[in-house]
Image (cartoon, grey):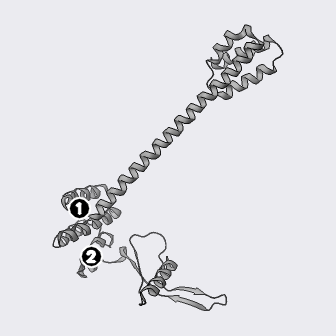
Amino acid sequence: MARRLWEYNVAASIKYKLPVYSVVIYLKPDGKAAESPYQILLHEGKVAHSFSFEVIELWKIATEDLFQTGLKGLLPFIPLTQEGQQREAIERVIDELGQEEVDKQRELLSFTYGFASLVFEDESDQYWLRRRFSMLKYILKESWAIKELAQEVAQETVQKAREEAREEAREEAREEERKQALQRARQILLSFIQVRFSALMQLAEEQCSSMKTPEQMEELLQQIILAQDEQEVRQHLLNVKKEKA
């Protein structure tokens, strides 16, 4: 993360020809946070680059401190702060955002709902959250974020359906190939018996009808080819019946 920040900072500084200050915001505790400064050292230990940036871990920030900033754009982060998992905090966010113009309100509320869903773990709280925001659906349904999410879900659903259809088609093709292979093996086996041991033709047809795989048919054909006489062929055929009994 620290290296990516450094790379982004350098790229932005070069592009805009202005000093750029980088901040990384962690929404939830997840592994070790990046540490400032990020340094690149030469082989003898000298510092080639030293890059400073700010790290914000939202769960360590007091909820009231974020409210006190007066910045409406920060309100969706309230659920991720120290006391932000309380219903009262969410209600306060909704009340304060209700004072905004409709377009801005719907976008900020959609982000609030998304962030709150990350940290509301109790089932009763999750039920309350869904119910509370369902009351605002007339606003949220026009949010670009909600529309984009719905579109992504729809695309994923369509893609999954397509993949399932392709897999079903492949499975049907494999099944058809298996049937064709079984039929070919059956024809070869019966043709061989018709030529060499015609008296066993009826028994062979009966036994072939009970065999379900080309491999089984091919194994029987090899046994019959190696058989010394008709009695041995009959025994091989009868063994098939015994195996299926």
Q: Is residue 28 visible?
A: yes
Q: Earlier in the sequence, mark 1 or mark 2?
A: 2
Decide which of 171, 53 is in the foreground and name it: 171
Residue underneath mark 2: 73
Look at 50% across and 77% down and name the residue there. 4
Q: Position of residue 16 (x, y in %)?
A: 41, 87
The front one of 56 and 236 is 236
67 sits left or right of 57 in the view:
left
Mark 2, Cα crowd under 10 Å, few <14 / some 14-19 / many 20+, is: few
> Which amino acid type corresponds to the residue marked 2 in the rendered image?
Gly
Q: Is residue 238 above or below residue 37?
A: above
Residue at x-position 42% and y-position 45%: 161
**Gap in angstroms between the C-alphas marked 1 and 2:** 18 Å
Q: In which image quadrant can residue 213 be found?
A: top right
- Nearest to viewer (mark 1 / mark 2): 1
> In the picture, which quadrant includes the C terminus?
top right
- The answer to whether any part of residue 83 appears in the image is no
| Image quadrant where residue 23 sits | bottom left
